[in-house]
Structures are given as structure tokens and as C-alpha cells.
Image (cartoon, helix red, strand yellow):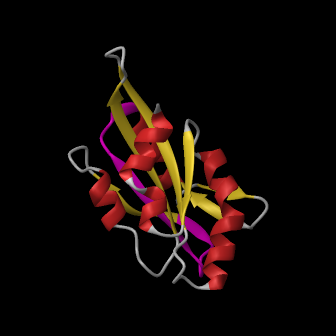
Amino acid sequence: MAMAFKMATTGMWVTEECKKSFMEMKWKKVHRFIVFKIDEGSRLVTVDKVGGPGEGYDELAASLPDDDCRYAVFDFDFVTVDNCRKSKIFFIAWSPTASRIRAKMLYATSKDGLRRVLEGIHYEVQATDPTEMGFDVIKDRAK
């Protein structure tokens, strides 16, 4: 069985694949984003979707379901006013209003445990609809 990291407060486990994919995104830049989901049956946080380096924020937003919660990390590259190339990693807690109450509670209580496993996140965005996590929100936070 693959190695997993236990999140003590919720009894959830984060799979090794989650951490490995995040490190590949952070250091090797082979992913632009990663979407994570909780499998309630096995109590595991797993990788749901990985966006390649050519994919952008629109593809990330399109990969989030309208009726279920997810976590996502997005590697935002930008150029500062001083003409310096920078990269910031955003953690997105997606909890749409149409999702089940149980799912919202599960994702809310498991969020900090996943963030501890994914070291190197710069900013966090919590969203219940697409306007709360629009690309303009990401750009404004990265300044």
C-alpha cells in the first residue's frame, strides 16, 4: 500500500501521490494546478485532476464541480512592476453552495491537515462560487 500522511484532527489520510504531485508542481513545474478530493469511504485525500504546464486558470476553474467540494493548488506565475519573474502557489478551498452539508463539513475540518502536508503554499482562497476565486482575485492577492 502507498504511504499516506495522517491528519490527526479528522482521521483523514493524505496519499503520497498528493505530496509527490505537489512537489513536482512546486520544484519541477510539470503541473500548473492540482485538484484534490476526499474519498469518504476510504477516508483518503487523493489527486482528482492534474493540469499540465500549458493549462491555465480557466482549466482549473472548469475542473471544479458545481455540486461537490474540492481542494486545489494553483501555481501562479507573474512579472512584478520591477520586471522580476515570480511564482506564488495558491491553495483554493472550493465549497459550492450546491454541495452537501456533510461534504462541506468534512472539507472544512480537513483543510488544515492537507495544508500542513503541502509545504510552500503562499496564499489561501476560500470560495463558494466562481466569482470568489476569479483570476482577478488571484492577481490581486499575488501583488
Give how far across and how far down residue 125 sits, in percent: 55, 52
Left/right placement of residue 24 relative to residue 94 reads left
Residue 16 inside the magenta-drawn segment:
no
Question: Which residue is at a point 32% across and 45% down the rendered structure image?
Answer: 31
The quadrant in which residue 59 appears is bottom left
Question: Which residue is at a point 33% across and 31% down the rendered structure image?
Answer: 78
Above or below residue 85? Residue 39 is: below
Give how far across and how far down residue 9 sits, in percent: 79, 62
Which residue is nearer to you in this view: 99 or 113?
Answer: 99
Span shown in magenta: 27-45
Residue reaching furthest left? 54
Which residue is nearer to you in this view: 2 or 77?
Answer: 77
Residue 30 inside the magenta-drawn segment:
yes
Which residue is nearer to you in this view: 24 or 104?
Answer: 104
The quadrant in which residue 24 appears is top left
Q: How many tags in the picture?
A: 0
Question: Which residue is at a point 34% across and 67% down the rendered structure image?
Answer: 63
Above or below residue 112? Residue 61 is: below
Above or below residue 7? Residue 136 is: above
Q: Quadrant of the N terminus?
A: bottom right
Query: From this viewpoint, is residue 36 visible?
Result: yes
Query: From this viewpoint, is residue 1 visible?
Result: no
Left/right placement of residue 105 relative to residue 49 reads right
Question: Which residue is at a point 47% across and 35% down the rendered structure image?
Answer: 142
Above or below residue 104? Residue 35 is: above
Residue reaching furthest top? 82
Which residue is nearer to you in this view: 67 or 16?
Answer: 67
Give how far across and how far down residue 34 sits, in percent: 40, 54
Give how far across and how far down residue 98 sits, in percent: 51, 84
